[in-house]
Amino acid sequence: MELKDDRLRREVFGLTFQNPVGLAAGFDKDGKSFNAMSSMGFGFIELGTVTPKAQEGNPQPRLFRVKKDEGIINRMGFNNEGVHALVERLKKGKPAGVIIGGNIGKNKVTPNERAEEDYAYCFDILFPYVDYFVVNVSSPNTPNLRALQDRKPLTKLLTMLQAMNHKKDISKPILLKIAPDLNNSQLDDILEIVKDSKIAGIIATNTTISRDGLKTEKQQIEEIGNGGLSGKPVKQRSTEVIRYLSTKSNGELKIIGVGGISTPKDAKEKLEAGASLVQVYSGMVYEGPYMIKRINQALLN
């Protein structure tokens, strides 16, 4: 299933990716299946979101397929076994040539004014075991988490992590994962924050809280309730965000594009909009694991 070709290789963030197609965070929160997933041909795998302490997440059911729209609604709530459990699995070794990212968040019980402590803790513990970091302040399923996307708290958080990063013998790329629901003025703020904190780049985008334009009956959507919507319904907005950030930064900002990729054409759209790499999750649920090879094959052609 794996497709190996030097032409697929990408140098981004100072790292060498064997191919530009990665597995998005949320699929393998605790690092239980990254070895199996790497054999499907991913160029990189993002683990997490992980928090300092283990937590149950939101009550079940909390994951729903929205089949008519080829989407998924989830309100998992950062369910994970905690950062130490993830580290124990990573200590056993990781697949050769596959870049591993660590997506970090805060525990639900940690108030926003102490969120930095949670991010700093995860960063420190995970540092020796992952190739890059993602700061997740954009999940809609942890109360008030998205408030950390505001300019002041976000600048403070990223500056602190960068200071920790520079104290290490070799620093590692830190990326910020943002919501698709930010408006242009908020995206301008994000660009300023990236510039000020000198982080490596952006992951655009997380799931959306919007329910606009769905084919699925309104009643069914209401019965599902709250959660982040991923898959095809977020595809267009995610690409718009990528294009906006790329254009505004004169193509200098490094972006990983994620949201609604299920075909080679979708992946190409993200790359043409300004992404250097792409990630998949919901599309793979609907299309199956051969999708990764199909995308890489199309990029070669």
Image: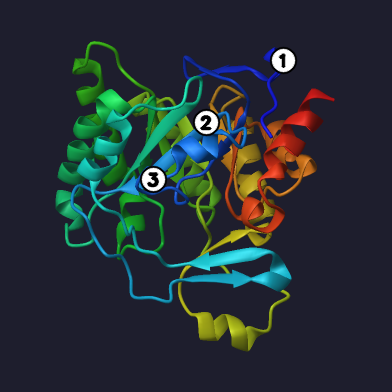
Please state if 52 lies on the left or on the right of 248 as rendered.
left
Report the mark closest to the observer, 1 or 3. 3
Task: Please name whichever residue, 141 or 181, is drawn nearer the observer in this view of the structure.
Answer: 141
User: Mark 2, mark 3: which one is toward the viewer?
Assistant: 3
In the shown orientation, is residue 41 left or right of residue 206?
Answer: right
Check disc 2 and report the residue beneath it: 44
Dividing the picture into quarters, in which one does residue 71 lie?
bottom right
Q: Which mark is residue 7?
A: 1
Let me know if residue 213 appears in the view.
Answer: no
Instruction: Kindly state the secondary structure of the residue where label 3 is placed.
Output: loop
Which residue lies most toward the right here?
301
The numbered mark at residue 257 is none
In the image, 188 versus 114, the foreground residue is 114
The residue at 40%/27% (across/down) is 94
The image's mark for residue 32 is: 3
The residue type indicated by label 1 comes to: Arg
Amino acid type assigned to the residue bearing label 2 in the image: Phe
Residue in the picture at 32% in, 62% down = 142
Q: CA–CA distance between discs 2 and 3? A: 15 Å
Q: Amino acid at mark 3?
A: Lys
